[in-house]
Image (spheres, rainbow, N blue to C red):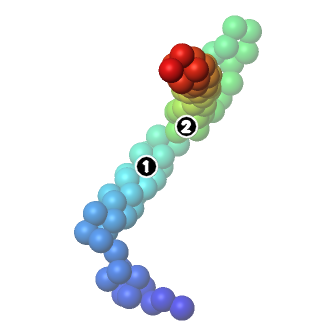
Amino acid sequence: MMRMKEYWDSLTTGKKAKLIFTFLLCVLVLVFAFQNWEAGQLRLVFYTIEIPITLLILISIFIGYSLGLIYMQKKVMNKEKEIKELKSKLKDFLTDQRDSL
């Protein structure tokens, strides 16, 4: 089993920087979460909910990320469909060119 020092020494400089940056980002998120854990009121149409501000922010981020992911997935599927159609047209074109020779 690889020891921590051996693992650290095996990492490239870029991976070390990424690991340090990720650790610092996690610490900052935790500090932010603890500073904003007080409850706030969320008013919906007919309801009022007491919810920690941090939780509200995390839920909003998750919903935004999910909607973005769905949008991008749809875009990728459309591009894949277009690529498939273009490959088919190219194959037909090349077949016609070969047959005409």
**Residue 90 visible in image:** no
Residue marked by disc 2:
58
Which label belongs to residue 29?
1
Q: Position of residue 88 (x, y in %)?
A: 61, 22
Q: Could you say which quadrant of the image residue 4 lies in?
A: bottom left
Question: CA gap, disc 2 to disc 1?
Answer: 11 Å
Q: In this rendering, would 84 be left or right of 97?
A: right
| Picture layout, residue 76 above or below residue 25 | above
Q: Residue furthest left?
A: 13
Q: Residue furthest top?
A: 45
Disc 1 is placed on an element classified as helix
Q: Please name the residue shown 25% across and 69% down the image.
A: 13
Q: Position of residue 15 (x, y in %)?
A: 33, 65
Q: Position of residue 74 (x, y in %)?
A: 61, 22
In this orientation, which residue lies closer to the viewer: 97 or 63?
A: 97
Q: Please name the residue shown 35% across and 80% down the image.
A: 10
| Picture layout, residue 30 above or below residue 65 | below
Q: Please name the residue shown 38% across and 88% down the image.
A: 6
Look at the image and tell me in which quarter the N terminus lies. bottom right
User: Which three-letter amino acid code belongs to the residue tagged 2?
Assistant: Leu
Disc 2 is placed on an element classified as helix
| Mark 2–mark 1 CB contact (< 8 Å) | no
User: Which three-letter amino acid code belongs to the residue tagged 1?
Assistant: Val
In this orientation, which residue lies closer to the viewer: 49 or 99?
A: 99
Q: Residues within 10 Å of mark 2 (few under 14, many from 20)?
A: few
Q: Residue furthest front?
A: 101
Q: How many marks?
A: 2
